[in-house]
Image (cartoon, rainbow, N blue to C red):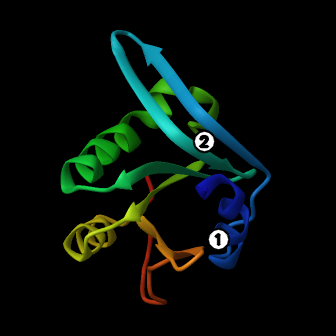
């Protein structure tokens, strides 16, 4: 459900989308990551963690993956890397925590997905 909406959602945030990749996995030097959705353009990469129910542990794990992304996926080493979390069920405290960590927060609202970040939000760039 997130993949079809990703182009619209990130374009609304001023991030053009040229490619969307699902299930990206990388392993180097005994370290590995798995990214549910990778949204890419010529200068930016947004790595999205997708869950049915998002918890703080999921956010923390995604933050670790974001820190390793450029090393494990060197194709993107020169790009601005940002992160996002998406969930069908997103407890308010988890959404606030992800926002404070500099992640885009995507959740369901009725039949649609939306980015919950306000206009003051500045994404963390890795």
Q: CA distance from mark 2 to mark 1?
A: 23 Å
Query: Where residue 111 sits: x, y (%)?
Result: 59, 75
Query: Where residue 57 sits: x, y (%)?
Result: 20, 48
Q: Is residue 20 visible?
A: yes
Residue that appears at 60% across and 42% down: 78
The answer to which of 80 and 56 lies nearer the viewer is: 56
The answer to which of 1 and 45 lies nearer the viewer is: 1
Q: Regarding mark 2 in the picture, which secondary structure is present there?
A: loop
Residue 12 lies in what quarter of the image? bottom right
18 sits left or right of 104 in the view: right
Q: Which residue is mark 1?
A: 9
Q: Give whichever of discs 2 and 1 has the lower sequence position.
A: 1
Circle 2 packing at 10 Å, graded few (<14), some (14-19), many (20+), is few
Residue that appears at 57% across and 44% down: 37
Q: Which residue is mark 2?
A: 78
107 sits left or right of 22 in the view: left
Query: Where residue 107 sits: x, y (%)?
Result: 46, 70
The answer to which of 103 and 108 lies nearer the viewer is: 108
Residue that appears at 68% across and 49% down: 40
Placement of 57 over or under 65, stated as above or below: below
Query: Where residue 86 sits: x, y (%)?
Result: 45, 59
Q: Which mark is residue 121?
A: none
Q: Regarding mark 1 in the picture, which secondary structure is present there?
A: helix
Residue that appears at 27% across and 48% down: 58
């Amino acid at each position: 459900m997130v993949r079809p909406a990703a182009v619209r959602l990130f374009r609304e945030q001023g991030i053009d989308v040229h490619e969307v990749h699902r299930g990206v996995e990388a392993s180097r030097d005994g370290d590995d990551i798995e990214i549910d959705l990778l949204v890419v353009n010529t200068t930016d990469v947004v790595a999205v963690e997708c869950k049915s129910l998002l918890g703080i542990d999921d956010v923390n794990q995604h933050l670790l993956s974001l820190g390793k992304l450029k090393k494990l996926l060197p194709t993107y080493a020169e790009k601005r890397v940002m992160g996002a979390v998406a969930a069908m069920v997103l407890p308010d405290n988890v959404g606030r925590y992800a926002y404070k960590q500099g992640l885009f927060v995507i959740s369901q609202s009725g039949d649609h997905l939306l980015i919950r970040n306000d206009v003051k939000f500045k994404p963390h760039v890795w």
